[in-house]
Image: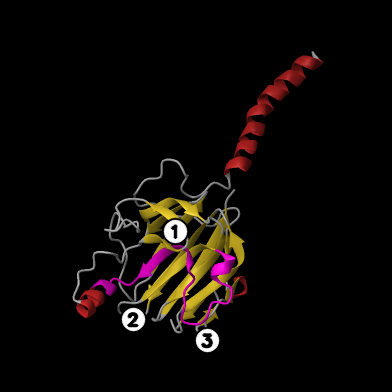
């Protein structure tokens, strides 16, 4: 009789144990699972396990002036000058992060650098950008107009809605649609808002694959990145820009 009671108890507890184990295994999955991601609007919850907010103590200057980047709580303001980057103190491999950004002038230019290696940052002089990393473009929508007016050419090689591309020595196989030379992943839709409105990015970088969501819509990406580990950088490229509420979660 005692053995029968124990057997009944074990069978009733088994689903609970398995469910808890499964929850423990899956709680660190990306917001959008790697398989079956759709190019569609979704909502993001960054209050779960493993999410941390990055602030002043999590970054250091690579080559900018001290007053190029000024923090005010979760917001960092950049004058954009001199050109350069603010880099994370920590290296990342598999991660997802969210951030709000806005340009404070018409046709502003900036971006995030993913997986930037040490040798691209060491001894980097002012007014230079790293020669390696994966750039997640942050352009004001007015940049197209300014480029076409100043150059007299059509803006066919870039967009202002979330291009992703390898920088310098880094490698990436961009997802279509592609830029004319095949080097950039162009967005599948135009969802960026003009200055001075805020834009929201969600980026997932997992096992050499990068995907970007702009204001809730997946738009661009690529895979086979090399290197696929390094620093996260914020870019100053000549125009005032602000980033806020940068939250990150490392993934297995």
Instruction: Specify the farthest residue to the top.
Output: 1
Give the Cα distance between marks 3 and 1: 27 Å
Q: Which residues are magenta?
A: 117-144
Instruction: Decide whether residue 135 is among the magenta residues.
Output: yes
Residue 127 as seen in the image, left or right of residue 231: left
- Residue 125 vertical placement versus 1 (above, below): below
The answer to which of 210 and 13 lies nearer the viewer is 210
Q: Are marks 3 and 1 in contact (CB under 8 Å)?
A: no
Q: Are marks 1 and 2 in contact (CB under 8 Å)?
A: no
In percent of the image, x 31 and y 57: which residue is there? 186
Helix or strand or loop: what does disc 1 sit on?
Answer: strand
Answer with mark 1 or mark 2, whichever residue precedes in sequence.
Answer: 2
Q: Which mark is residue 202?
A: 1
Badge nearest the viewer, 3 or 1: 3
Q: Quadrant of residue 135?
A: bottom left
Give the Cα distance between marks 2 and 3: 18 Å
Instruction: Decide whether residue 244 is among the magenta residues.
Output: no
- Residue 242 vertical placement versus 178 (above, below): below
Give the Cα distance between marks 1 and 2: 23 Å
In percent of the image, x 35 and y 70: which residue is there? 139
Q: Which residue is mark 2?
A: 105
How has the structure been colored for display? secondary structure
Helix or strand or loop: what does disc 3 sit on?
Answer: loop
Q: Is residue 43 visible?
A: no
Helix or strand or loop: what does disc 2 sit on?
Answer: loop
Q: Which mark is residue 164?
A: none
Residue 194 as seen in the image, left or right of residue 212: left
Answer with mark 2 or mark 3, whichever residue precedes in sequence.
Answer: 3
Answer with mark 3 or mark 1, whichever residue precedes in sequence.
Answer: 3
In percent of the image, x 71 and y 24: which residue is there? 10
Q: Where in the figure is residue 171, as x and y percent of width and height?
A: 45, 56
């Amino acid at each position: 009789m005692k053995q029968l009671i124990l057997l009944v108890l074990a069978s009733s507890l088994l689903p609970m144990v398995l469910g808890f184990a499964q929850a423990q295994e899956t709680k660190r999955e990306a917001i959008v699972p790697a398989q079956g991601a759709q190019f569609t609007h979704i909502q993001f919850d960054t209050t779960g396990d493993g999410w941390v907010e990055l602030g002043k103590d999590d970054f250091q200057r690579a080559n900018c002036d001290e007053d190029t980047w000024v923090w005010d709580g979760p917001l960092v303001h950049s004058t954009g000058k001199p050109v350069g980057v603010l880099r994370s103190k920590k290296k990342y491999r598999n991660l997802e992060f969210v951030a709000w950004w806005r340009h404070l002038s018409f046709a502003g230019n900036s971006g995030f650098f993913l997986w930037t290696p040490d040798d691209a940052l060491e001894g980097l002089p002012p007014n230079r950008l790293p020669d390696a990393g994966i750039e997640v473009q942050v352009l004001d929508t007015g940049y197209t107009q300014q480029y076409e007016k100043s150059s007299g050419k059509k803006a066919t090689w870039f967009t202002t809605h979330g291009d992703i591309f390898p920088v310098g020595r880094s490698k990436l196989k961009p997802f279509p649609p592609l830029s004319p030379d095949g080097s950039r992943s162009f967005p599948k839709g135009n969802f960026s808002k003009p200055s001075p409105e805020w834009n929201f990015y969600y980026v997932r970088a997992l096992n050499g694959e990068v995907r970007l969501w702009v204001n809730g819509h997946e738009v661009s990406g690529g895979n086979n990145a090399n290197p696929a580990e390094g620093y996260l950088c914020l870019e100053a490229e000549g125009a005032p820009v602000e980033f806020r509420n940068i939250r990150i979660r490392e993934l297995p």
